[in-house]
Image (tube, rainbow, N blue to C red):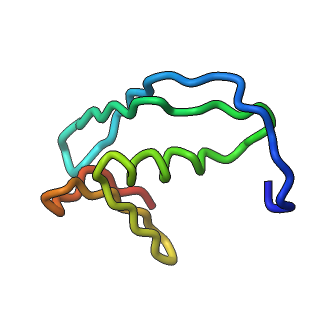
Amino acid sequence: MGDNSTQEIVGKRKMKINMIVGVNNIFATFSDVIYVLGLTKKIKIVSKATSQGYSVEFGDDFCEVRNNQKKIVAHGV
């Protein structure tokens, strides 16, 4: 929220994400992803990804997600 306010968690579920790496479609499933009413940015997925063994790196014009073997499983620009 950016102002240190708190919001109620209104749901929790599994989330399946289709990631395109090169010419391959890779699916990742994250467990216990929370939904917070009013949160418009999908920031919590970063926290959930890292808690499940993925690493997330942001650059000036990209974002990469790597698995625990350091292989890129998602790249966004």
Residue farthest left in this picture: 69
Q: Residue at x 44, y 67 (%)?
A: 62
Image height of 10 relative to 69, above or below:
above
How many marks overall? Answer: 0
Position of residue 14 in the picture relative to residue 7 (left or right) = left
Most foreground residue, 12 or 55:
12
> How far across and how far down the image is residue 72, in percent?
22, 58
Q: Residue at x 43, y 24 (%)?
A: 14
Q: Residue at x 48, y 52 (%)?
A: 46
> How far across and how far down the image is residue 56, in percent?
39, 61
> How far across and how far down the image is residue 64, in percent?
35, 61
Position of residue 21 in the picture relative to residue 31 (left or right) = left
Q: Residue at x 64, y 22 (%)?
A: 11
Image height of 70 relative to 47, above or below:
below
Residue farthest bottom in this picture: 60
Position of residue 67 in the picture relative to residue 12 (left or right) = left
> How far across and how far down the image is residue 74, in percent?
31, 51
Report the quarter where the C terminus lies. bottom left
Most foreground residue, 59 or 35:
35
Position of residue 26 in the picture relative to residue 29 (left or right) = left
